[in-house]
Amino acid sequence: MMPSPGSSLPRCVCGLRDRILAMMEKRGWSTEWIHRSAYLHLEAAELAEAVRGKRGDTLDESADVLITLLGLSPHSLSDIILAVEKKLVRLERSPAYPHECRGRPAKKRRKSK
């Protein structure tokens, strides 16, 4: 369940970005934006393959995408979640904008646990 703006997030979320950056430094991973953005693209592609059923576990690949995103973004996960909440409220209330990519109608999805 997504938190409402102003609500507190689980303690494990706070400081997650700092832990990721420390792990990256310890393992000698590049923190340069050009490398991180390439890794984000690759991890997102691996998630798409898992969703398609080609290979990989969707939860594991989702975690890889989030780790890579937090290693690239200058924002904490709690800040990102709050921005998502605000953007989602706005998108739910506003009509589609011209040339919005719609594709096929979305299938009804099961709620996540």
Image (cartoon, grey):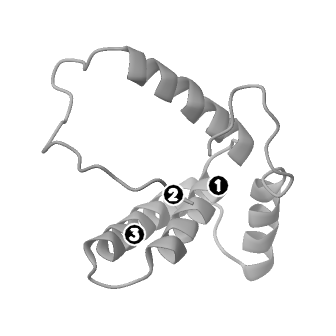
- Quickly name the residue at label 2: 112
Dot 1 amino acid type: Leu
- Quickly name the residue at label 1: 70
Name the secondary structure under disc 1: helix
Q: Is residue 76 visible?
A: no
- Quickly name the residue at label 3: 47
Of labels 3 and 2, earlier in sequence is 3
Mark 3 touches mark 2? (CB < 8 Å): no
Q: Is residue 8 visible?
A: yes
| Identity of the residue furthest to the bottom in this view | 55
In the foreground, 89 or 28? 89
Q: Residue at x 40, y 83 (%)?
A: 56
Q: Is residue 90 above or below residue 46?
A: above
Dot 2 amino acid type: Ser
Mark 3 touches mark 1? (CB < 8 Å): no
- Badge 3 density bin: few <14, some 14–19, many ≥20, Cα 10 Å: many
Quarter of the view holding residue 55: bottom left
